[in-house]
Amino acid sequence: MTATPTPAAAESADLQIEEETTAIARKRHNEAKAAERKLGLLLVSPAVVIMLAVTAYPVLYAIWLSLNKADLRRPNDNHFIWFSNYVTVLSSPIWWTAFGVTALITVVSAAFELALGMILAIIMHRTIVGRGLVRTSALVPYAIVTVVAAFSWRFAWTQDLGWLAPKGSAPLTSFWPSIGIIILAEIWKTIPFMALLLMAGLALVPEDLLKAASMDGASAWKRFWMVTVPLIKPAILVALLFRTLDAFRIFDNIFILTSGSNNTSSVSMVTYSNLIRGLNLGIGSAMSVLIFITTGIIAFAFIKLFGAAAPGADPGGRR
Amino acid sequence: MAEIVLEHVVKRYPDGALAVDDFNLDIADGEFIILVGPSGCGKSTTLNMVAGLEDITAGKLIIDGQVVNDKAPKDRDIAMVFQSYALYPHMTVRENMGFPLRLAGMDKQTIRQKVDEAAELLELTQHLDRKPANLSGGQRQRVAMGRAIVRQPKAFLMDEPLSNLDAKLRVQMRTQISRIQKSLGTTTLYVTHDQTEAMTLGDRVVVMRAGVVQQVGTPAHLYAHPSNLFVAGFIGSPSMNFLPGQLKGGGTVVTALGEAQLPDRSRRALDGASGDREVIVGIRPEHFEDASVVGDKPGATFDAPIDIVEAMGSDVYAYFTVKGEGASSAELDELAKDTGNDLHGTGLSITARLDAASGVRRNSTAKLWYDTAKLHLFDASTGKNLLEAN
Ligand SMILES: Nc1ncnc2c1ncn2[C@@H]1O[C@H](COP(=O)(O)OP(=O)(O)OP(=O)(O)O)[C@@H](O)[C@H]1O
Ligand SMILES: [Mg+2]
């Protein structure tokens, strides 16, 4: 640099300094982030170790089985067949029907659960009188064992006996009514769970923000969409993720309500039939691995797609 | 811009707490009104009723000649600045400030322009794309102000908007708020705890206590003519000194400072109240003076055993204690609690503000004078100012 810098040179020097300090600040920030991440990994490691010890063996064994011809009816015929089981499963219409049914149940029930769960959460959040009673009674469906509840649903929809079945009809004997009833049972059972998670989110929205929004001219509807929903997005995502993964593995309700008749089997039902009833360990294992992969993809997609809304992911979203 | 009238407004919360009782106030168009009072006296409640965030139990709220008791906040066209700022964390500064305009359905271009103007006024231009979490306290405060001013509402309501700032920033923002209010000429209702804000910002000040309005007036009027003990003690810093005393028939008062003859004007104001009676005498610190500096102005003198002297440059604060019980009343007790000045020592502590030329020394006795024309006399039981005819 010269002894008497020209204004332009001084300016460019300033600019350079600014860039350099920004770079340093960014580097520090990243280092701090890395250290934090390291601590995080350290903290979860005991849990991970236990998880691995308990689940790794069955998972790995299932993967191994899925690559073998392993049919308990022909125990002497076991041998390694690479991906033949997968080819069999993925080219079977039974699998794809079940997959479609499962996806349908998952999407529809998760959507309804979110909407109704949100309404219930708001009611529970807003009630002043008899708060305890409202919350307790809202939780009753979640407290009932699914199988027991499923039996009462089945009874309620049984021809001539059930109090819900229209006279002379047997809704559980045809496809669409069965699917509807299965979804209904799922929704009824899990709304409280959804509502609880969402209510935890609602409790985090400062009262002042909603007051400010109404002063700014927002109606209740706009306050909900423009202030509450963006602020509880993390809670919504967690609730949706849990429910989607859960719903995709639906088993007990279908098992009791229809036993998979009229093509109402879910992927878990089909897997069960092959594995336990059909004693075909190879095919069954291939199916469970496929379910495992699908749920993995769903979870990954959720996190990737909505990751930016997760708490801490957005530097400006810190509260 | 609007005229706001509160007529016999009462607020009782569902749990039975009476937060505001019979509140009456006429706020003129463009006026800056300050609500002060100790914690829990109902300031925020009053403000929230005007905002529409709390419903009005009884009475009428009239904005521009229209009763608005049952209007929703969004239909009152009033902007509010919260103590917590209440900025939307998921929006940038620009989005925060533009939010009321967006809700009003303005087009993007106009919103942009108005937000830019407001940002310019509040020196926020370079922060427009940041999120509130990344701003300093003062910047957040200005964003909250900006959100209130962009839409040019009928009135501003502010609930202790500066109380989360440090002292220096508070002074800075105080002048800025004053400037903005003057230039926009928007009717403003401002709640504060702070003496200085109350005395410097407002056109008129409303002093509240336990939900009841004590006095309404210009800062100068409240200072010179407090209507009761509570207002006298609340307004002014350092606060008024109170001494128990007896009022004698001939227009003399006897206190721990000795006997003082009241001037004719005060005697006339007391007319009719003959006979001896118990009173509380109030003297503001600046109405004391070093007797040697005063000359022969009318007043009374006494000997003060000075404990502490603080030279402030322009004047000198002298602290001393005189014998006797402190003046006691429910109102004074409440004031003491509010200021955290709850010391019941022996004797009576008095603060005097003297001329810088005064030669008072610490731990020595000085001859002090006080202005008998500026004495305040309060009824010992009701706390009413006996010299003010209301
Ligand atoms: N939601 C409520 N329910 C019942 N009582 C309330 C409620 N809000 C306030 N109060 C009571 O009303 C009175 C006035 O409260 P308010 O918040 O108006 O006081 P304030 O003057 O703003 O005090 P501060 O200076 O501490 O903010 C208090 O005694 C308070 O306990
Ligand atoms: Mg308050």
Image (cartoon, rainbow, N blue to C red):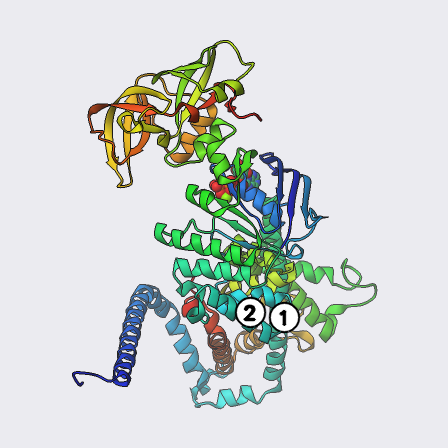
Residue displayed at 43% across by 14% down: B252
Q: Residue B344 placed where, x, y %?
A: 34, 24
Name the residue tied to disc 1: B106
Identify the image quadrant of the N terminus of chain B: bottom right
Measured in 3D between alpha carbons, the distance from the residue under mark 1 to the one under mark 2, in whole angstroms, is 10 Å
Name the residue tied to disc 2: B114
Q: Is residue B287 above or below residue B179?
A: above
Q: Is residue B295 left or right of residue A298?
A: left
Residue displayed at 68% across by 72% down: A179
Q: Residue A106 placed where, x, y %?
A: 60, 72
Corner quadrant of residue B357:
top left
Q: Earlier in the sequence, mark 1 or mark 2?
A: 1
| A163 vs A246, nearest the viewer | A246
Corner quadrant of residue B215:
top right
Residue displayed at 77% across by 57% down: A163
Q: Is residue A50 above or below residue A22?
A: above
User: Which-is-in-front pick, marks 1 and 2?
Assistant: 2
Circles 1 and 2: CB atoms closer than 8 Å: yes
Q: Amino acid at mark 2?
A: Lys
| A46 vs B293, nearest the viewer | B293
Q: Is residue A110 left or right of residue B298?
A: right
Q: Are marks 1 and 2 on the same chain?
A: yes
For the residue carrying disc 2, how many other residues have a C-alpha within 10 Å: few (<14), some (14-19), or many (20+)?
some
- Tell me the subunit letter for badge 1: B
- Tell me the subunit letter for badge 2: B
